[in-house]
Image: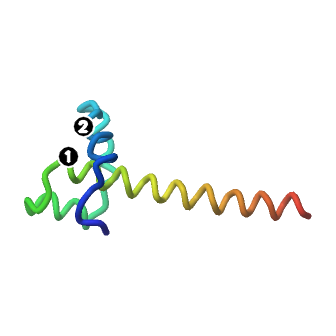
Amino acid sequence: MKKIPSEKYLAKAALLTKKESEYVYSRMGKKLGRRLDDDKLIPIEALAIQLEIEDDNLKEWRKRFAEIKAQQNKA
């Protein structure tokens, strides 16, 4: 897990409304949540890291889905 969020995701996290932030917090993993609870991260950094994790997961999912779709089109 990254320890330092990128500036891009810090900016995205800063633009979230309170309701959106709470929704992102609810999807946060245990390890990241513990770092936030232990005051190792400030809330905006935790949000930024979570947004980055979700973007990475989405990119990976899209890549795999495109591979599956390509295989189906060949058949």
Mark 1 to mark 2 CA distance (whole Å): 7 Å
| Residue 15: quarter of image | top left
In this image, 60 relative to 29: left or right? Answer: right
For mark 1, what is the residue? 44
Of 70 and 35, nearer the camera is: 70
Tell me if mark 2 has few (under 14), some (14-19) or many (20+) residues whose alpha carbon lies within 10 angstroms of its own: few
Residue 48 position, x and y percent, is 28, 50
In this image, 38 relative to 16: left or right? Answer: left
The residue at 30%/54% (across/down) is 6
For mark 2, what is the residue? 14
Q: Residue furthest right?
A: 75
Residue 1 position, x and y percent, is 31, 69
SS of the residue at dot 2? helix
| Residue 17: quarter of image | top left
Of 5 and 66, nearer the camera is: 5
Of 2 and 19, nearer the camera is: 2
Q: Amino acid at mark 1?
A: Ile
Tell me if mark 1 has few (under 14), some (14-19) or many (20+) residues whose alpha carbon lies within 10 angstroms of its own: some
Q: Amino acid at mark 2?
A: Ala
SS of the residue at dot 1? helix
The residue at 23%/65% (across/down) is 3
Screen quadrant of the C terminus: bottom right
Q: Is residue 33 above or below residue 21?
A: below
Residue 31 position, x and y percent, is 25, 67
In this image, 64 relative to 74: left or right? Answer: left
Badge 1 or badge 2: first in the primary sequence: 2
The residue at 14%/57% (across/down) is 41
- Contact, mark 1 vs mark 2 (Cβ under 8 Å): yes
| Residue 65: quarter of image | bottom right
